[in-house]
Amino acid sequence: MKTNSPRNQSTKALHLCVVSAFPPSRGSLTEYGEHLVKALLDLPQVAKVTVLADTTNLPESIHHPKLEVKRVWRFNDPLSLFKIQAALRQCRASNVLYNLQFASFGDQKIPAALGLLAPMVSRVLGTPSISLLHNIMETVDFKQAGFGHNPVMETITRAAGWLFTKALLGSSMVGTTMPRYVKILEGKYAAKNVFHSPHGAFSIRVPKPLPNTRTVMTFGKFGTYKTIDSLIEAHQILLGYDPQIQLVIAGSDSPNAAGYLERTRQTYKRVPNITFTGYVPEEQVAEIFEQCSVVAFPYKSTTGSSGVLHQAGEYARAAVMPQIGDLADLIKDEGYQAEFFEPDNAESLAQALWRVLEPAGRAHDLGIANYRAATDIQISDVASNFVHLFQRLGLATPARVAAHVRNSTVTLR
């Protein structure tokens, strides 16, 4: 990865503000927010990072001399917009970075929509803002994601999505995690301040050997577009090939599908060799990935750049996935490799998994290919690019913002 930036950049140390769900909360993009903030803290150009985070009753889990965490907004609180702006004025940060997806501030329409006005309001009130969007409305399958239960509501939701996308484009600059999103925003909204900011791998370590027991793992929040029924049925097929094979289901329910995992566990409670881990704390993520042979992606649709695929690459693990949406784009754009199956088809999934697990060395080779893709773009590079952009936004005119996008975009090697 390289960062192209204009010469003679300011050397003044920045006080950055980051608006994001943040550990120990379990909100959307919590893990990404944690790793992005840690990467910013490591940069010498950054004097301080203030995180305006979602509320939680748990004690703070991350401490750093340059870090201040203020718990100022709450999921589904329609006042979050105003609380964020008040906190921004109080902390007097140089700039603000919003780490967002469309449901970051709520799964209820009014608080979710009002929260998405925050980046534009910040800019209007005098604080340069960059919004990092992990998804956009145009690529979301509302039915699979748990929204849009009837055509009329889906039409209304998409119209609202258009309006609030326009509002988000009122940020000083907007980064998206997928190149395709840049093209959509430029084409549909005539946006001039949009750039591609790759997801980035969180950390790179020496890969550990595959486990002796064949182990399939899936990781995430389940019940909407990520479901495990077909994966468990595929596991039953694989047990006929190898009675020792293990299936690990790591993660929790999607906010829009409360109780899904427990209902599914009860339905398949007689199927052997299945482990439900529940929520996985960040300090246990490495162990979960390193103890598996292959990572399965039982998705029916996608809603953004896959953090799980990037993590599979970090730990040199093979992937089995449907060739759809953003997953297909990651294979094309970032060099990841996988075995493919037909979505929601247990037999196809079982055969794809077996093509990885049965041949000697296949899981290892795919894992190494994904490791190489992950090491090419790291979160530290993404953080550096944001700092370069912020160093130029203090007195930026619209024309200069457009120039910054052209000259400071994170690009793939």
Image (cartoon, rainbow, N blue to C red):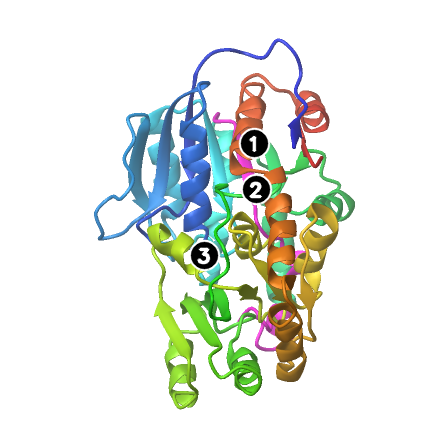
Q: Which residue is mark 1?
A: 381
Which three-letter amino acid code belongs to the residue tagged 1?
Answer: Asp
For badge 2, the amino acid type reads: Gly
- Mark 1 or mark 3: which comes first in sequence? 3
Q: Which residue is mark 2?
A: 200
Magenta stretch encompasses residue 26? no
On screen, 143 above or below 266? above
The CA span between labels 1 and 3 is 25 Å
What quarter of the picture does the C terminus occupy? Answer: top right
Say if 288 sits above or below 347 in the image: above
Distance, label 1 to label 2, CA atoms, is 8 Å
As displayed, is residue 260 above or below residue 122? below
Q: Position of residue 109 (x, y in %)?
A: 48, 61
Residue shown at the point (61%, 51%) measured from the top left: 368
Front residue of this view, candidates 141 and 300 = 300
Magenta-colored span: 126-154
Count of numbered circles on the image = 3
Mark 3: which secondary structure?
A: helix
Q: Position of residue 152 (x, y in %)?
A: 63, 74
Whether residues under marks 1 and 3 lie with C-beta atoms below 8 angstroms apart, the answer is: no
Q: Which residue is mark 3?
A: 290
The foreground one among 376 and 55 is: 376
Circle 1: element type: helix
The kind of residue tagged 3 is: Glu
| Quarter location, residue 257 | bottom left
